[in-house]
Structure formats: structure tokens, C-alpha cells
Image (cartoon, grey):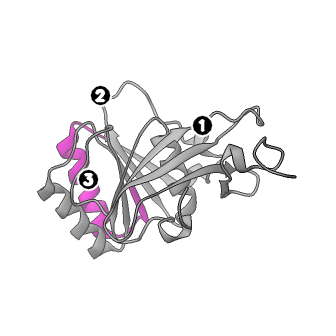
Amino acid sequence: MSADLRQSFPLRCGRVHEACGPAAFGFAAVVCAQTPGELLWVRESWLGDQINPVGLSQFFDPARLLLALAGNQAEVLGVAEQALRDGAVALVVLELSSSPSLTTGRRLQLAAKAGRSTGLCLIPEGMGSNAAETRWHAAPLFDPEAADSTLMRWKIIKNKSGTGGAWDVRWNGAARRLDVVSPVGERPGSAGTSD
């Protein structure tokens, strides 16, 4: 694991970031919880699954979330750019089915800066824009100590203003906060440590 997570998270305001991996939706839910104010989640209407705001209630009040469906990725990007530039919402989450171009990524960055809003693009693994401020990979981790674990490993795989890093984190629903968890071999009671 690496340095302090607080150097990179919460996400830098006025910038657009990216997340990928099997726990990218969990990452986005935590980002929503950590962002005060109104939230916009934009996705393509053809996607077969649905977002249920009530399912996100362990993270934040679902009344703060506005869902927008667009016909295609170009419309998703257009809605997101306008929302970021307007600044009426604190966070815009975009679900993208393919990587945005450098020009598109730069337009989103300029819009986020103008509106002082934060953008988070959920992208397929192995894709991304060079314009992104940070790119995170989020994956679930098995935790034998917890029956219903939200344990995840977050890695910064691209960071324009710092270094990379990896952290094991868990969402604490009761306290509504993100806890950084020691790796298994370093936890009290583990084979490699003394209690």
C-alpha cells in the first residue's frame, strides 16, 4: 500500500476523473456520498440495467440524485458538459461505453473548471482519456471477517498531480464514512502480526 489516501481523495473539485473496474459503481457511490450538494448521473438509455436511487441510500440521501438518460454517448457527453459548466450540481457521474477522445476530455475539464463542479466518468477497463485528472481502478476484495463486506481495493493508475497508490477501503454505512483498512497480513490477529 502507499501514502495517505487523503492526498488524492475526495476527488479534486473543478476537475474530471475516471473510474474503472468491477467495483467502479461502488467507487462512484462513495464519491457521491463524499460530495456535498446535488448530484447528476447520466447514462445511455439503451443500457439494460437500471440505477435504483433507493439502493444508494446507505451512501447518501437519494433525493439528492437526478438521473438522466441520453440516447447515445455523444448526448451523455453533451449533457455532462452543460451540467459541469453550469455548476448547479456539485458532481456529474457519466457512464461511458467507450473512451472519450482527448478533445472531448479536454472540453469536460474546461467545463468542470468553469462551473467548479466535479466530473466522474465510469469507463470500461483499459480505456480512458489523457485529459482525466485521475484514473482509479476499483475492485471488490473478499473479507473472511465480515458477512456482508464492502471491502474494496482502490488503485490510482493515472494521476496528473501526484503519484499512484493503492488502498483497501470499506464504506462504513452507520457512520457514513470511508475507512482505510490494513491489508490482511497486517490486521490484528493475523498470522504475520502480534496482537
- Residue 38, image x and y in percent? 48, 62
Residue for badge 3: 79
Q: Is residue 84 magenta?
A: yes
Q: Amino acid at mark 3?
A: Val
Kindly indicate the quadrant of the structure image that contains residue 179: bottom right
Q: Which mark is residue 56?
A: none
Query: Could you tell me the amino acid type at mark 2?
Result: Trp
Circle on res. 46 = 2
Q: Residue furthest top?
A: 48
Segment colored magenta? 69-92
Residue at 19 percent of width and 48 percent of height: 100
Q: Is residue 94 above or below residue 180?
A: above
Residue at left offset 53%, top offset 43%? 26
Q: Nearer the viewer, mark 2 or mark 1?
A: 1
Whole-angstrom CA distance, mark 3 to mark 2, is 16 Å
| Left or right, residue 35 beside residue 161 | right
**Label ID, residue 141:** 1
